[in-house]
Amino acid sequence: MDMGAILSILDATLRLSTPLLLACLAGLYSERAGIFDIGLEGKMLAAAFAAAAVAAVSGSAWIGLMAGMAVSVMTACLQGVAAITLKGNQLIAGVAINMLAAGLTTFLGQQWFHQGGRTPALGPDGRFGAIQLPFAAELSGVPILGPIYADLISGHYLLVYIAFAMVAVTAYVLYRTRFGLRLRAVGENPKAVDTAGISVNKLRFQAVLITGLLCGLAGAYFSIAQGSGFGNNMTAGKGYIALAALIFAKWKPVPAMFTCLLFGFLDALQIRLQSAELFGIEVPVQAIQALPYVLTVVLLAGFIGKAVGPKAGGVPYTKER
Amino acid sequence: MSALRPLPRWADIALLPVLNLILAFLISGLVVLMIGQNPFVAMWAIVTGAFGNGYNIGYTLYYATNFIFTGLAVALAAHGGLFNIGANGQAYVAGLGVIVTALALDQTHWLIVAPVAMLAAALFGGVWAFVPGYLQAKRGSHVVITTIMFNFIAAALMIYMLNRVLKPAGVSGPESAMIEEAGRMPKLGQFFAPFNYTPVNFSIFVALLALVLVYILIWHTRFGYSLRTMGANPTAARYAGISNSRMIMITMTLSGALAGMVAFNEVLGVQNRLVLDFVADAGFVGIAVALMGRNHPIGIGLAALLFGALYQGGNELQYVISGLDRTVVVIIQALVILFTGAMEGLFRPGLQRGFALFSQESRAEALERSTVKSES
């Protein structure tokens, strides 16, 4: 493989890991607050649809992005009401959200645009374009570092840079702010937080809202940055991979970034290769596709390190009657 | 405020699910109204599409067969406090067992093929659920996450098997060879004319039998008692000498075996070959069916019939109202899961308060209060 091929795989890795990373960080906030979220997929799908639909009608990617985030936050609120206010089963709420998003996006897409569930293709203003970082063209002549800067680091969509910036923001919020401390505490021991006079439900709702915002970014990325328009079930299980990445990263922001890059790399690899030779044995492409899931199961099983989630995860908080 | 008393049994098992279902229908009706269609016309189209004639009923029963199996799979695990979200993957992998045994034996007779294929389906589905069960029991990995992962691993595995192993020479699509005529399970249409040209087959009797067997297993065996004890209170179960880890592994295996029966219906009874994605999300419908049916076989039978009718009626919807199709049913299904599973708190406290007003104790209390007042 030459330099160009390696760069193009790494370039694809960045593009493919961006939605994973956004969704993974989204999940991090609610899971750290003690809300299991298997509804990441549904929120992304709803946001992808809303973003594409509004961008198609308004002709503006920014308005589309806002709409995607708004719909994702609304979906997150619904989930929050079920899981926090009504103390329902968080897992079942997630399943319901995923199914509802799959049904509604297909249904409304078909009704509004009559293109078999697709939204109209977006023009250049309707989607985010690639951003050329300063001096990319000038520096591309520099050996090795030049192409890396010009081809790999420069020339991505805005949301790609936002996603990686969010890693630093999340790490700062989680470990260096009062809100982050409380967030982590409410996921481990909500009773203690409650005793300190802080509302558990309010904190959890805040976490769920942040989850909604980030899922909105992730969803919009699919339909108005990477793609130009919404296609049926376009998130294609990426929400579950993000969930797997979150567990694999042990609910920590920086490891989450590396895990998403790894999973994105595997995805880029399987798109590029139909099959690979490894030590003379042919590895089918499906094995590469299944690898993120297998790795997560192996990690969960504690064979390579141990993934232990927030202690109060999945349990609705009830103040004493 | 004093603790609310639990609801009367009939309200818990019938009134609440019906209220939740009505709410789900209302909201879906609003969605239909929003796009400018008449929800009552749509509803009637679904009802006639599901039960209008023998052909419709045949299809309804065929869908219901799958949903009984997955509903039972989810419910059995739920009695032990386990959420098996992987019925899809388990059913999918079970297809391998069915097709391998059926293709090996299809020169003989379907009466020989069917039991062997059934066992193979149970075995393959069971093994696919046993692994997450084992990991939960022995390594403490959350069964929900592992079963989700196993759904995706199953999908990748099956694509590989269909493309590379099972595809016969000369076939372009990813599918296995056809099972010989002699090995196919007869469809009910061969014996009962109104069901002609519908996929409903002998496996519906297996489904009905499974309902009875699961009922006996859960409420009339030592195993079932241990299962329910573990589901209600794992700590108490441990003190009662029940091995929770053993129970988890057995329960998950049985649950996977039940889910595997979907493959028995689809592969041996309907498609007569293994195709991509033949499960068609029946595993997720099973979650709705189990929640709606309150994890009881009678409820599951009825809920499976309801969802079978919705699926078949939803298929017919597009011929009555152009533009409306089965995605409406997916919305209804999602809302049913949301309301019965995750938003139980919506109606329950209100109902409990309502019932408390009319309970014997509150009447007696009220009487006492009024007599005290009159005396003083």
Image (cartoon, coloured by chain):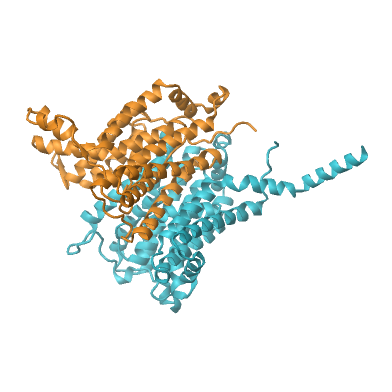
Question: Camera-side residue: B157 or B33?
Answer: B33
In the displayed structure image, the side of residue B308 where residue B269 appears, left or right? left
Chain drawn orange in the picture: A
Question: Would residue B82 be seen by someone viewing this image from the given angle?
Answer: no
Question: Camera-side residue: A261 or B317?
Answer: B317
* Location of the N terminus of chain B (image quadrant): top right
* Residue located at (48% from left, 45% from top): A92
* Location of the C terminus of chain B (image quadrant): top right
Q: Identify the colour of chain B in the image.
A: cyan
In the displayed structure image, the side of residue A66 where residue B73 appears, left or right? right
Question: Camera-side residue: A187 or B230?
Answer: A187
Q: Give residue B135's position: percent from left, percent from top.
A: 40, 38
* Residue located at (43% from left, 66% from top): B312
Residue A129 lies, with reference to residue A207, above or below; the image says below
Q: Give residue B13's position: percent from left, percent from top.
A: 61, 53
Residue A228 lies, with reference to residue B2, above or below; the image says below
Q: Give residue A191's position: percent from left, percent from top.
A: 55, 26
Residue B257 lies, with reference to residue B270, above or below; the image says above
Q: Give residue B322's position: percent from left, percent from top.
A: 39, 68
In the displayed structure image, the side of residue B365 where residue B81 appears, left or right? left
- Residue found at the very far bottom of the displayed protein: B193
* Residue located at (35% from left, 38% from top): A23
Q: How many labels does the image show?
A: 0
Question: Would residue A228 be seen by someone viewing this image from the given angle?
Answer: yes
